Amino acid sequence: MKHMLIKAASEALILTAVMAADGPMVPDYEVHLLMNPSAVLGSDFKLTPTVLSTFAMPTTVTKINVQYLDTITEDFHVNGWSCRIRNVENKSGFDLTYKWRLPVNNGDINGALNTAFSDGWNSGQGNYDAQIDWLYSSQTLSIQRDYSASSQGYSGTDNPSEKDSRNMLEDNAPGMFDDWVSGGWGTDLLRSAVIYGPILTKRSTGTWNGLELDIEVWPIENSSGTGIEYLVEASFKTDDFDTASTLRDQLITLLQNNGWFLAESVSKEDLVMENYHPTS
Ligand SMILES: *[C@@H]1O[C@H](CO)[C@@H](O)[C@H](O)[C@H]1NC(C)=O
Ligand SMILES: *[C@@H]1O[C@H](CO)[C@@H](O)[C@H](O)[C@H]1NC(C)=O
């Protein structure tokens, strides 16, 4: 009897230790595939009726105004971080996202999760979400934390001014971001951060193979800043690697068969950071 009690107590101790133990984060998966703008957009730069009906999408879109804050020399971007502010049509407040990214080498997702773990990212950090962003020929581990900030004084899909953007990002800055390079690194740099964007994007939401599928249209300034290039991206999310992999193959085939596929791996955020050159 005494022996059994001791055994039960030690098992409970072991269980507690396992639950509290740090381990690498567990990601979900988001597949991102680019569509050829000249094949899927009409002359009004909206998705064609055939694209909409293929993915059971209504003609109504959700407007999302997106901007990133970074220094003129892109210190956050260079260190794997981004600070994003979004105004989603008809949703109260601004969405703030602090995101850290690490490229996945040759499909070695566990390797990336282990590297992140050694950089301080662990499964005990319940306020952060880990995701594998799976593009056509690359994968990235993204770890993000979201907040909401008041949009009082702003209307429609307007985004906050540079000063208000800096302030709301400073006020909410989580420790992992703020102390990434050294104590207070993030908030120090936010004081001189500038706006990359804004980009007024449009999201169509439909269903495909029982999953929600989104198509976003991003009008992004081209590299000379004298015109707009349209980036059109289809995406879906799932918790499971095998589902992501199988449906990704099927979606590529569907897009190819319709002549809609663009076999490139450009991330929306990277293109914005590359093409916008704010000076103040
Ligand atoms: C947002 O609200 C306006 C006005 O009520 C409406 O016309 C529009 O369709 C709404 N947009 C979305 C995406 O729900
Ligand atoms: C940007 O767009 C303008 C207008 O379409 C065009 O004249 C210019 O060549 C483009 N620049 C680049 C680098 O694509």
Image: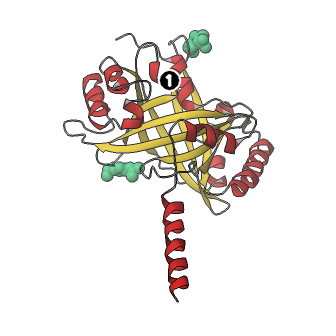
Viewer-side residue, 174 vs 60 = 174
x and y percent of residue 157 in the render?
33, 37
Q: Ligand 2 closer than 8 Å to the CB at disc 1?
A: no
Helix, strand or loop at mark 1: helix
- The quarter holding residue 111 reads top right
Instruction: Work out whether residue 46 can be spotted.
Output: no
Mark 1 neighbour density, 10 Å: few (under 14) some (14–19) many (20 or more): some
Side (left or right) of 146 relative to 123: left
Q: Residue at x 47, y 42 (%)?
A: 144
x and y percent of residue 181 in the render?
44, 24
Q: Residue at x 56, y 49 (%)?
A: 25
Q: Residue furthest left?
A: 153
Instruction: Work out whether residue 137 can be spotted.
Output: yes
In the displayed structure, 237 sits above or below 95; it is below
Tell me how many marks there are.
1
- The quarter holding residue 171 reads top left
x and y percent of residue 269 in the render?
53, 29
In the displayed structure, 33 sits above or below 73; it is below
The quarter of the image holding the C terminus is top left
Q: Residue at x 61, y 37 (%)?
A: 115
Colour treatment of the image: secondary structure
Q: Residue furthest front?
A: 2
Side (left or right) of 72 relative to 17: left
- The disc labelled 1 sits on which kind of residue? His
Query: Which residue is disc 1 drawn over?
Result: 77
Side (left or right) of 248 relative to 220: right
x and y percent of residue 266 in the render?
64, 29
